[in-house]
């Protein structure tokens, strides 16, 4: 029963109906074309036969009106001589017979071997032709096949002395036509099989390519923050095995990334509690034992650095979540001015607001502020009081560009790509209190907005970090 339902599903499928319709159309067009070709060939054959018969009779008529070659005298009443000269000059085709009848009896044939239907002893046609007094065109069906003929009586002084007949038995020529049509049928059949096979292959390859295209589109749509998509499993072929393997790989990747995110989230949250407890205990010790200020200050500094590291790890972990951004309409001019005011209070530097862009964008105001403040902290760390730090923004070519430029140490070309990686610090002779996550956070925030970070720097000169966000 299940097998019957499966066959019924296959027979009623759209693909089956399409192929069936195509086969019927091909067969119908093949039959029609073969009939048309056969009819054209037969029509052309009959025209050639008619022209050949008429041509022989016309040549016979011209000979009767002509003269003898040797003497130049007309043939006169010598009908036998006319027949002899004509048969000597004309060689008919294999299926064409020249028959001369003199005084009611067969005089000569153009062939030594003639079909039984034209033999003088048993041919009714010979008797009919011998009695003709007027030209006659006709056809008759005999055991040897259909005979087409054109008879021309020879009348002298009002009396029929003889009859000239051109007869044609086109059975073999019709056979040649049928043979040619058969060859065309074989060729068209082969072409139809090739076309049908190509169509079936096209449909089958289309199905395979569709599944491969779906596999490719799913692979392109997968990102580190979204591994939930799966490809539907259909059939039981190699593509199905590839699909199953691909889905299983996605399951493993999703489990691995989920485990990584969960670990970073759990570690960040769990570390906050002991840090808070240690901080409270040290505050109590500082109250009870004020004679150790240097030791306590060092411990507090390390706790502050550890707390900042935990917060940065938590930001990077959240950056992989789809709800990392809280999007809103942001006024570019007010955001730039706000960032400049906040940055200028962090350290004594030569601060400069280069330009303020105008317009609005859809972005997360808090995350952009966090990214710019990280860039500002990085610029402060690599500059002194005599250096200049510049902020600016612009909306141009459907891009929002927000930059921080400093005239500090600059960055070596070999380090310009590495510094955006996690836990990587730029080369410097000074001790860093950071964990090397600030620029990684800037990059994560820019990419979460669909943008990127551009860096232009020359060692010993200046560095410009630009956050680029497509509008």
Image: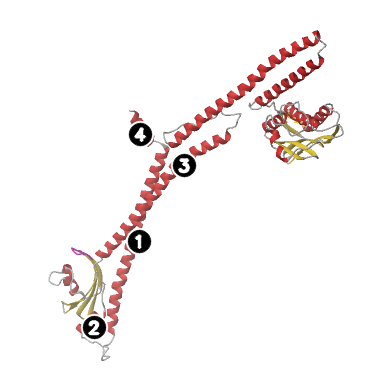
> Alpha-carbon distance for marks 1 and 3?
40 Å
**Cα separation between marks 4 and 2:** 78 Å
Which residue is at 49% across, 39% downward? 210
Which quarter of the image is occupied by the N terminus?
top left
Give the magenta part as a residue range: 141-146
The CA span between labels 2 and 1 is 37 Å
Q: Residue at x 38, y 33 (%)?
A: 9
Indicate left or right for 375 with 75 as reference: right
Residue 60 on the magenta segment: no
Question: N-terminal of the two: label 2 or label 1?
Answer: 1
Instruction: Give the CA separation, mark 4 to mark 3.
Output: 22 Å
Q: Is residue 470 visible?
A: no
Q: Earlier in the sequence, mark 3 or mark 2?
A: 2
Where residue 86 sits in the image (x, y, percent)? 25, 81
Residue named by callout 4: 7
Disc 1 target residue: 40
Q: Which residue is mark 2?
A: 85
């Amino acid at each position: 029963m299940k097998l019957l339902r499966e066959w019924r599903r296959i027979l009623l499928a759209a693909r089956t109906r399409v192929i069936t319709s195509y086969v019927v159309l091909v067969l119908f067009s093949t039959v029609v074309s073969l009939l048309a070709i056969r009819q054209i060939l037969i029509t052309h054959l009959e025209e050639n036969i008619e022209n050949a018969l008429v041509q022989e009779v016309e040549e016979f008529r011209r000979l009767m009106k002509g003269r003898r070659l040797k003497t130049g005298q007309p043939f006169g009443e010598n009908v036998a001589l006319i027949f002899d000269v004509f048969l000597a000059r004309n060689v008919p085709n294999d299926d064409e017979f020249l028959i001369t009848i003199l005084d009611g009896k067969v005089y000569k044939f153009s062939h030594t071997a003639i079909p039984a239907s034209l033999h003088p002893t048993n041919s009714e046609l010979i008797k009919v032709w011998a009695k003709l007094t007027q030209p006659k065109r006709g056809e008759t069906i005999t055991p040897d096949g259909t005979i087409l003929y054109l008879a021309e009586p020879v009348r002298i002084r009002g009396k029929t002395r003889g009859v000239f007949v051109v007869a044609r038995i086109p059975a073999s020529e019709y056979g040649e036509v049928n043979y040619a049509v058969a060859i065309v049928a074989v060729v068209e059949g082969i072409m139809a099989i090739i076309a049908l096979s190509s169509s079936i292959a096209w449909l089958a390859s289309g199905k395979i390519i569709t599944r491969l295209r779906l596999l490719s589109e799913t692979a392109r749509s997968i990102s580190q923050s979204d591994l939930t998509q799966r490809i539907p499993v259909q059939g039981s072929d190699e593509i199905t095995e590839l699909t199953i393997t691909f889905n299983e790989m996605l399951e493993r990747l999703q489990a691995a990334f989920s485990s990584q995110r969960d670990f970073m989230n759990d570690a960040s949250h769990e570390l906050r509690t002991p840090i808070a407890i240690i901080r409270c205990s040290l505050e109590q010790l500082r109250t009870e034992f004020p004679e150790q200020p240097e030791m306590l200050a060092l411990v507090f500094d390390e706790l502050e650095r550890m707390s900042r590291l935990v917060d940065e790890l938590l930001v990077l972990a959240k950056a992989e979540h789809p709800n990392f951004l809280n999007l809103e309409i942001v006024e570019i001019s007010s955001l730039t001015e706000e960032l400049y005011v906040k940055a200028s209070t962090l350290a004594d530097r030569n601060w400069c607001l280069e330009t303020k862009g105008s317009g609005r964008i859809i972005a997360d105001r808090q995350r952009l502020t966090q990214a710019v403040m990280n860039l500002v902290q990085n610029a402060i760390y690599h500059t002194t009081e005599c250096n200049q730090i510049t902020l600016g923004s612009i909306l141009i070519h459907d891009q929002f560009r927000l930059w921080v430029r400093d005239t500090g140490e600059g960055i070596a070309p070999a380090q310009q790509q590495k510094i955006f990686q996690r836990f990587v610090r730029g080369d410097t002779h000074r001790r860093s209190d950071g964990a090397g996550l600030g620029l990684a956070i800037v990059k994560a925030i820019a990419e979460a907005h669909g943008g990127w970070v551009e860096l232009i720097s020359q060692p010993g000169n200046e560095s410009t970090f630009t956050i680029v966000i497509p509008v």
